[in-house]
Image: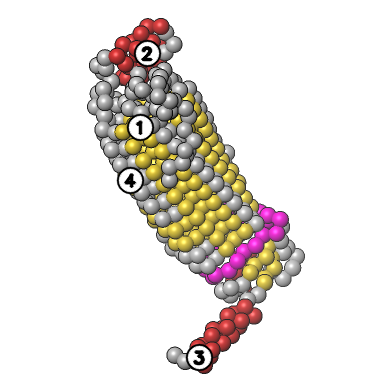
Amino acid sequence: MNGISKNIIYSFIFLIVLFNQVQSRILIVQKGFRITSIKSALELSNNGDTILVKRDYYSEGTIIVNKSVTLIGENFPIIDGNHKNQIMIVKSSNFKITGFQFQNSGISFISDNSAIRLDSVNNCIIENNKFLNNFFAIYLSKTRNSQIINNTIIASNNKQTMSGNGIHLWNCKNIYVIGNKIEGHRDGIYLEFVRSSFIENNYCKGNLRYGLHFMFSDSCFYRRNHFEMNKAGVAVMFTKNVTMIENNFKNNWGSSSYGLLLKDITDSKIIRNKFYKNSCGIYFESCNRNQIFNNDFIENGWAIKLMTNSMNNLFQRNNFIENTFDVSTNSTQNFNTFTENFWSNYNGYDLNKDNIGDVPFRPVKLFSFIVANNPVTLILLRSYFVEILDFAEKIIPTLTPANLLDEKPLMKRSYDKIN
C-alpha cells in the first residue's frame, strides 16, 4: 500500500469519527421541560448520545437501556424502585452511568432484583453513584471488559435471607472493581465463574456474611482492599491462580468468623497482607501449592488453622505477633513448609548473630490441639497446667505433628519483600 492510499484511508476514518461526534447529542431531563423522564430520553436518544439528568426524584418502574449512551446525573438525582422493581437493566454495550442515587429495589429470590444490572454487554462503566437499601445493588451477568468504580453501596437489612450482594459478578471476565465502599449487604463483593478480574482499594465493612466471597474463579488479582467487622470475614472457594496483596483483614470476630477462609485453593499467592484481631487469620482446607509470604498476623485468636488435607503450602518470612495460637492443625501429620518466620512466642537464642534462631520453633501448641477437639476447654487457656502441657509437648511431641516446625525462626520481625 503506497503512502497516498494510506492517507486516503486515514482521512476517511477521521471523517467517520468526526461525523459521529457531530451527530452525538446531549439530551436534558428536567421536570417542567420538554423531556421529563429518563425513559423518554432513552427513546429519543441514539447511540453515542449523552443524557443529562437534573436533580429530582424519578420513579419510572424498570428502565431498559438498549442503546450505547452516557447517563450523567447532576447532583445525584434519585431513581426509586419503591421496593417493587428492578430499577435499571442495561442490554447495550459501551454504556456509562455516573452521578445517580439508586434506592429501594424490590426483593426477588427468583429474578435477583438489583438497582442496576448489566446483562451480556461489553465496555461499560458504573462510576460515582450511590446505592441505598437495594436487594442487589450492582449485578453483572455475562459481562466483559467493564469497570465498577468509586460507588457507595449501603443496605440496612438484618437478615442474610432478606439481603442480596453489594456487587455481584456472575460469569464475567476482565472486570475492574475499584474504590467502592460497601456496607450492610449479604456479601460485599461476590464473584462466581469470574476470570482475569482486578479488585482494588474497596472498603467492605459490616456485611452480613462475607466482605468478599468468590467461587469457581481464577486468575483474579486482589490488592489493598479493607475488610472489617464482616460477620464471617472473607471466603475464597474452589479457585486457582489468585493473587492477594496488601489487603487488610481486621476485627472479623465471632465463633465462625475468619479473616480469610480458603477452601480448595491452588497455586495462589498471599503476600504482604495484614491480619489483625480476627477470630482466625487464615483457615486452610484442602488448599495446595500456595505461597504465603511477608504477611503480618497480629493479635488473632488463631493466626492459622491448617487442616491436614492441605499440602505443599509454603509459609515464609511472615510475622506472628501476640496471637493466642499461632498455628493449629487437626492431625499429627504435616505436609507443608514453614521457614524463616518471626514468632513472638519464640524463646530461642542466636549465638552467631545471623538473625536466625539456633533452635527450631514448634508453633503448634498441645492445647490448641485439645481445643480443636474440645472447644469448651478454652476456659483453661491461661492456667498453669496448660503451660506445663505445652512445654512437655515441645520437648517430646506426641499429639502434635513432629515435623511441623520452623527450622529457621527469625529473631527479629521481617520487613523484607518477596514478590
Mark 2–mark 3 CB contact (< 8 Å): no
Q: Which residues are magenta?
A: 64-84
Q: Amino acid at mark 4?
A: Asp
- State yes or no: discs 1 and 4 in contact (Cβ < 8 Å): no
Crowdedness near tag 4: few (<14), some (14–19) or many (≥20) residues, C-alpha within 10 Å: some
What's the residue at 47%, 56% (across, down)? 175
List the residue tagged with mark 1. Answer: 339
Question: Is label 3 in contact with label 4 (beta carbons under 8 Å)?
Answer: no
Closer to the N terminus: mark 3 or mark 1? 3
Task: Point out the tag, 2 or 3, that comes first from the N-terminus.
Answer: 3
- Closer to the N terminus: mark 2 or mark 1? 1
Q: Residue tagged by mark 4? A: 267
Mark 2 = which residue?
Answer: 377
Mark 3 is on which residue type?
Gly
Q: Circle 3 is placed at which residue position?
A: 3
Q: CA distance from mark 3 to mark 1?
A: 63 Å
Question: Disc 1 to disc 4, how far (Cα)?
Answer: 19 Å
Q: Nearer the viewer, residue 239 or 74?
A: 239
Quarter placement of the C terminus: top left
Disc 2 residue type (three-letter):
Thr
Q: CA distance from mark 2 to mark 1?
A: 30 Å
